[in-house]
Image (cartoon, helix red, strand yellow):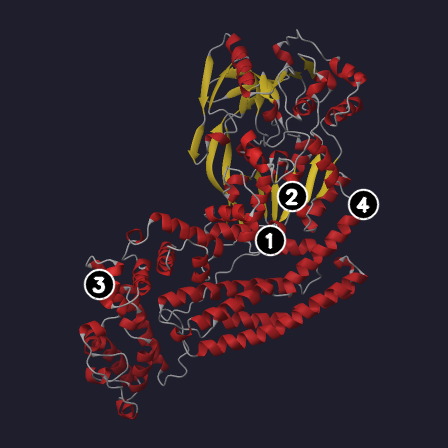
């Protein structure tokens, strides 16, 4: 790892940072060993105003990068992914993304993949497939997420086993990431960091370039083999480290050297808390050390006494503390803690954050007489010994040599044959293909202009709000029989008003393009700045009114299921409008790309929530003669519903409460003449209701108004049997608890099985029926996967994406069970 404390910034570094933070272009940031790639990532994480997720191909690489593995983030299978219709369908069918994971991937603006050289082509296409699906942007590579790939293609390559490559080669020309279909569809801009910080000698840098590019001639080999000392045996204080190609070689050397030391050995066991898989251990789970052992630090010290890769010698040991001598300077070492994290959305602010799953605490040391080339990637050493007699893969010789700060610090235990120095032709061709055409600075200006347009169009096109208004309109029409009469009129008026404003917004975005032709840098475009301010002042009161309209909507239903459906979209629309108003408020000030992004990431989710369910819903009672009584009756009814868990209609629906407040019944007989009240309900709730009515009338000098009811008599109805009076779903439930199957209930009641399944779903939602008793685990799994991919918007869509033997009723049951768990 580059010592970030000593690295300075340079022009390419700054340009790369601006490309990532001020454009939406996909970037491949590369550079030779020691050019500052690790430092760039650290700086980006600390300073960017975009929602970033950092991932890497392996657990150790993810820990080192402060991110997560690609496989855990996207739940990727370890089998090869085939970029075909069947392959995509199979991958999406295995996804188990819960809503919060989907929201996380939708909030992500920038995906950083570190150590990209090790990421295989099919992995990139699998990630692309998932993001297009989850983000519902099927036409955009990676679903519209900006991609930053970091790594050096001349270092460690991706792994493709022979049997895997025999399958993949039908679709890909090489295993490297740049040969994935999605990268070929939208090539990233290659930016190469070219200032080398690790090596200071020009002659050594020149030699490393020859090795990297497979351009070694006889003179170059002579220079390299001037460091050939086959019998070399360093003194301990010289602190040489041997680089090997395989783990067992490094382990053997370390064990042999440790055994030679006469001192007593100490064993330090790591403390693992919660979830920290062994494959991700950043240090030994059981660390065995002796005084005099050569060790390497595995972490950067916050006090800057040591860094990852620094070599020292154990001076003194006890169970609680270790003292390491580094060139005469004693370092008192204490255990360090590494975190295994995952990305999540903050419950309060909705921002991307890293949640700690588990921790690994251990002394940040390892034996350092030897280390594998793979584990040395990113580290810097003063003195190394290299045995090139072992088999090396493409790029390993370059990685091994480039770990050292100087040629004089290298000792070759065997000569490096020309056959060991080779560059993968695919890498050479891929690097050429990715190389930018023309000036990077000019490319940046154009890309920044495009990004500015994207931001302004995001603000003034109101696209997300449009989608949510249309979905809400669809849902209201779908549930209209269960809703208050004002609902349809309200949504139609809201949509009409919003559509008119959206047309104005879309026209404004077209004008923005014209203004930017005159001056593409928005910060310098005074005319455009004024138009943005004017537009914000124009739209702000309108969208505040839309937000107020949602917060005070007239939609009321006494059906829990209908309310649950509507509440989801009402609240999504409310939050979208709140965010829109947050953006418009910013646009009243001078617009800047960087400050807008900073403003955007500071947004915090408001504690706003609305409901369409009649219980607990504040309802306008202006159309009721005695609103105070109506409100008292409603509070009483809501309390009964909350305590008993009964549906509203079994206590008193809205119409019944309105009639009580209108006609003021004084007796149970009066009550039975009102809608919704029979003998049983009047006996059960009559005393409470009549007490409230009589108290209200006494305080307000009112008499009963039942005489006016004679002009609107309660409709006579013939006495129904007990079965006829019992709600149909309860009849089905009663038969079910008697032990009858769905088919038997359907036959007995002369109803379709899907109807019975719908009846029983409501009791699954209230946890009176266990879902496992009605739907097999296998079917539940398939239905949940389909919901994760397609959402809960349409049971028809879910049915079309599931096996034929899964019924609509079973889908509804699983959806009901999921609701009860949330």
Toward the viewer: 225 or 259?
225
Instruction: Report which residue position mark 3 lands on.
Output: 734
Q: Earlier in the sequence, mark 3 or mark 1?
A: 1
Callout 2–callout 4 Cβ contact below 8 Å: no
Q: Which of marks 2 and 1 is nearer the N terminus?
A: 2
Which residue is at a point 30% across and 54% down the rendered structure image? 774
Pair 2/1: label in front: 2
The total number of labels drawn is: 4
Which residue is at a point 67% across and 38% down the rendered structure image? 40
Pair 3/2: label in front: 3
Q: In this view, does 263 lie above or below 673?
A: above
Q: In which quarter of the image is the C terminus?
A: bottom left
Mark sitting on residue 439: 4
Pair 1/4: label in front: 4
Q: Is residue 604 left or right of residue 532?
A: left
Q: Is residue 653 left or right of residue 310?
A: left
Image location (x, y in percent) of residue 31: 71, 34
Q: Which of marks 4 and 3 is nearer the N terminus?
A: 4
Q: What element carries label 4?
A: loop
**Label 1, residues with CA under 10 Å away: few <14, some 14-19, many ≥20:** some
Instruction: Report which residue position mark 1 lands on.
Output: 601
Q: Earlier in the sequence, mark 3 or mark 2?
A: 2
Q: In which quarter of the image is the N terminus?
A: top right
Mark 3 vs mark 2, CA separation in Å: 59 Å
Q: Is mark 1 on a helix, strand or loop?
A: helix
Q: Earlier in the sequence, mark 1 or mark 4?
A: 4
Mark 4 vs mark 3, CA separation in Å: 76 Å
Q: Is mark 3 on a helix, strand or loop?
A: helix
């Amino acid at each position: 790892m580059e010592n970030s404390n000593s690295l300075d910034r340079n022009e390419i570094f700054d340009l790369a940072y601006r490309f990532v933070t001020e454009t939406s272009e996909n970037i491949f940031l590369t550079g030779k060993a020691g050019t500052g790639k690790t430092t760039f990532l650290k700086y980006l994480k600390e300073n960017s105003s975009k929602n970033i997720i950092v991932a890497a191909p392996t657990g150790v690489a993810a820990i080192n990068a402060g991110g997560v593995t690609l496989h855990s983030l996207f739940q990727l299978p370890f089998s090869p992914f085939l970029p075909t219709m069947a392959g995509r369908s199979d991958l999406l069918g295995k996804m188990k993304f819960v809503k919060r994971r989907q929201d996380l991937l939708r909030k992500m603006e920038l995906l950083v993949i570190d150590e990209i050289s090790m990421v295989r082509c099919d992995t990139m296409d699998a990630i692309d497939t998932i993001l297009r699906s989850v983000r519902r942007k099927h036409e955009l590579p990676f679903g519209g997420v900006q991609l930053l790939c970091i790594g050096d293609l001349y270092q460690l390559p991706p792994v493709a086993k022979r049997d895997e490559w025999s399958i993949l080669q039908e679709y890909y020309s090489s295993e490297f990431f740049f040969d994935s279909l999605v990268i070929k569809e939208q090539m990233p801009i290659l930016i190469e960091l070219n200032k080398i910080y690790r090596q200071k000698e020009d002659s050594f840098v020149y030699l490393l370039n020859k090795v990297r590019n497979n351009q070694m001639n006889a003179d170059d080999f002579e220079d390299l083999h001037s460091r050939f000392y086959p019998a070399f045996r360093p003194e301990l204080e010289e602190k040489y480290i041997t680089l090997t190609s395989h783990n067992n070689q490094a382990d053997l050397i370390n064990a042999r050297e440790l055994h030679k030391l006469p001192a007593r050995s100490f064993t330090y066991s790591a403390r693992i808390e919660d979830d920290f898989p062994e494959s991700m251990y950043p240090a030994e789970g059981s660390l065995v050390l002796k005084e005099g052992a050569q060790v390497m630090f595995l972490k950067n010290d916050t006090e800057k006494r040591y860094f990852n890769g620094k070599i020292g010698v154990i001076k003194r040991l006890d169970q609680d503390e270790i003292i390491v001598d580094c060139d005469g300077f004693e370092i008192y070492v204490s255990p360090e803690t590494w975190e295994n994290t995952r990305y999540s959305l903050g419950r309060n602010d909705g921002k991307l954050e890293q949640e700690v799953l588990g921790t690994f605490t251990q002394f940040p040391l390892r034996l350092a007489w030897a280390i594998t080339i793979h584990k040395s990637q990113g580290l810097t050493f003063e003195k190394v010994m290299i045995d090139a007699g072992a088999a090396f893969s493409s790029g390993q010789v370059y990685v091994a040599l480039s770990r050292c700060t100087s040629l004089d610090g290298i000792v070759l235990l065997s000569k490096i044959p020309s056959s060991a120095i080779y560059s993968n032709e695919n890498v050479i061709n891929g690097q050429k293909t990715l190389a930018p055409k023309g000036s990077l600075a000019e490319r940046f200006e154009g890309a920044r202009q495009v990004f500015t347009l994207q931001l302004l169009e995001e603000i003034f096109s109101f696209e997300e709000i449009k989608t949510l208004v249309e979905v809400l309109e669809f849902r209201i029409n779908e549930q209209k029989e269960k809703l208050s009469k004002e609902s349809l009129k309200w949504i139609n008026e809201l949509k009409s008003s919003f559509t008119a404003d959206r047309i104005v917004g879309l026209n404004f975005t077209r004008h923005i393009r014209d203004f930017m032709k005159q001056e593409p840098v928005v910060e310098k475009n005074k005319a455009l700045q004024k138009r943005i301010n004017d537009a914000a002042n124009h739209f702000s009161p309108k969208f505040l009114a839309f937000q107020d309209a949602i917060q005070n909507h007239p939609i009321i239903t006494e059906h829990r299921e209908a309310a649950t459906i509507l509440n989801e979209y009402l609240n999504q629309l409310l939050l979208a409008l709140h965010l829109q108003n947050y953006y418009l408020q910013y646009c009243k000030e001078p617009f800047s790309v960087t400050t807008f992004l900073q403003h955007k990431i500071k947004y915090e989710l408001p504690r706003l929530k609305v409901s369409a369910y009649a219980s607990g819903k504040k309802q306008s009672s202006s159309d009721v003669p005695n609103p105070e009584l109506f409100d008292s009756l409603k509070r009483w009814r809501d309390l009964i519903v909350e305590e008993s868990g009964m549906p509203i209609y079994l206590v008193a629906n809205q119409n019944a409460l309105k009639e009580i407040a209108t006609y003021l019944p004084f007796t149970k007989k009066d009550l039975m003449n009102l809608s919704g009240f029979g003998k049983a309900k009047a006996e059960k709730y009559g005393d409470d209701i009549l007490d409230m009515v009589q108290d209200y009338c006494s305080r307000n000098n009112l008499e009963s108004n039942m005489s006016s009811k004679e002009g609107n008599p309660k409709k006579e109805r013939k006495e129904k049997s007990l079965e006829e009076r019992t709600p149909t779903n309860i009849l089905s439930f009663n038969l079910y608890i008697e032990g009858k199957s769905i088919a038997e209930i359907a036959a007995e009641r002369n109803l379709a099985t899907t109807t019975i399944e719908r009846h029983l779903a409501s009791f699954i939602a209230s946890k009176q029926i266990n879902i496992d008793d009605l739907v097999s685990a296998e079917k539940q799994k398939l239905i949940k996967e389909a919901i994760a991919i397609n959402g809960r918007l349409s049971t028809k869509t879910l049915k079309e994406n599931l096996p034929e033997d899964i019924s609509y009723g079973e889908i509804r049951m699983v959806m009901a069970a999921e609701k009860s768990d949330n």
